Amino acid sequence: MNIPNAEWVNPLISALEAVQLAVLRLLSWVGLSGTSEGQAAWPWPLRLTGENLLIDLGQARRLAWTLALLALAVVVLLLALFWRRRRWWLMGTVPLLLLLAPWPDASVLMAPAQPTSFHRSPTGFSAGSIAQGRALYAQHCVACHGADGRGGTLASAQPVWPPNLAGPLLWKRADGDVLWRILHGTHDRRGRATMPAFADSLDAQDVWALIDFMKANAAGQSLRATGAWAQPIALPDMTVRCGDHAPRALSAWRGQRMRIVLADASTAPPLEDPRLVSIIIRTSARATTTPSADCEVDNADAREALALIAGAGTDALPGLQLIADRDGWLRARNAPDQSAWSEDDLVCRTDLAPQATRGVPASDGLGALIARIDAEPVRSVKGGFIH
Ligand code: HEC
């Protein structure tokens, strides 16, 4: 997550992304940008990135000063337009302002770009898409990358060892850049192919599904290895039935905290709680007497996606509970044999040391957990931008 302490850098970096997206939208609106894989294509081989500014506050400061001086130069030019008597005098200060500006290094601000760099995934991170990605990964990728993403049987035969897909890599990259590399392959500095291209056998929709699967898999691997989700992971979307209403997407509940309970017939019903929407996912299709909750899901893809993210492979894990925050990020996990919640169950966080409960009575572990979830919202850095 690596968010810098200097709060003023965040809006600066967000602005870098917003400006580029606006330019792209404008180009596509006037018909100047082509399309690539169904979305407007970025026309240049470079783009601005905030990634280095997060590390190099000095450069970020230079960029901020430069932008401020550029804005001032624009104001001075406007003034010169209307103030005839001082026009030449005012115009003379503009080059001075440009000279005074502490321009940041271009190499710090620029990153290589692909036509798909700014593409957004159309899948909505759904359980169905993760299941599709899982099947494609087993078919096309597992030999080189391995089931756990750390390298498969053919890894050592590659020109370079494939990167660890169970680490933060997929969060560092823009999704659109990953899409491009999988479709068109990768090359080393000398132009030799390192990973083969898959554009002949996979389309963009397949690759978006693969990206969803690889993220879910990496989250599960991280939880297994370190006991935490080191990178933020969203609650996969799925179809839920709530009371007598027609089935609908879980994402329609965004804005509410959600508790997911994987349950078989022997699981005790979760106590109703006004602070959360409870969703039961049946772990065995035949169980007819599963406990009741606000909403129910009876779908193998949903079961498997959650087991994957919880680091349990395809095991059903009856009794496992997960909590998602109001923004849809998964935040806490409760093991099947654990009876009550506590702050230690917060597994999506950057500091791994358990914190002392701040004056909250121990009897309300769930309350303490929710207070911390609300107090520490997830902010993720993705492709050099903060979301
Ligand atoms: C023949 C072996 C091989 C196969 C098959 C393969 N990869 Fe790779 N992959 C590599 C190698 C080698 C690299 C490292 C490339 C580099 O760093 O230049 C890599 C890199 C990657 C990366 C990181 C790209 C980045 O941005 O740095 C991703 C993501 C990835 N592969 C996904 C996949 C997916 C998904 C599939 C299946 C559709 C797949 N790979 C199939 C060998 C393979």
Image (cartoon, grey):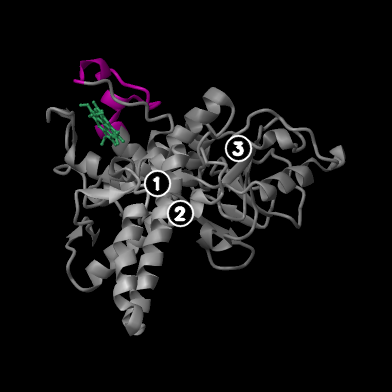
| Disc 2 residue lies near ligand 1 with CB under 8 A | no
Q: Residues within 10 Å of mark 2 (few under 14, many from 20)?
A: some
- Which marked residue is nearer to the observer: mark 2 or mark 3? 2
> Which residue is found at the position 57% from the left and 42% from the top?
5
Q: Earlier in the sequence, mark 1 or mark 3?
A: 1
Q: Amino acid at mark 2?
A: Leu
Q: Quadrant of residue 212?
A: top left
Q: Which residue is mark 1?
A: 50
In the rendered image, residue 355, in percent from the top left (x then y), is placed at 74, 32
* 296, 66: nearer the viewer: 66
Is 343 drawn above or below residue 159 in the view shown? below
> Which residue is found at the position 23% from the left and 56% from the top?
42
Question: Which type of secondary structure does the marked residue at label 3 adopt?
Answer: loop
> Which residue is found at the position 19% from the left and 48% from the top?
45
Q: Which residue is mark 3?
A: 349
Q: Which residue is mark 2?
A: 12
| Disc 1 residue lies near ligand 1 with CB under 8 A | no
* 284, 79: nearer the viewer: 79
Q: Which span of residues is magenta-colored? A: 138-159
* 100, 318: nearer the viewer: 100
Q: Residues within 10 Å of mark 3 (few under 14, many from 20)?
A: some
357 drawn magenta: no
Q: Quadrant of residue 94?
A: bottom left
Ligand 1 is found in the corner quadrant, namely: top left
Q: Earlier in the sequence, mark 2 or mark 3?
A: 2
Is 218 drawn above or below residue 372 in the view shown? above
In the rendered image, residue 86, in percent from the top left (x then y), is placed at 35, 78
Q: CA distance from mark 2 to mark 1?
A: 8 Å
Horizontal placement of 309 versus 372: left or right? Answer: left
Labelled pair 2, 1 in contact (Cβ < 8 Å): yes
Q: Earlier in the sequence, mark 2 or mark 1?
A: 2
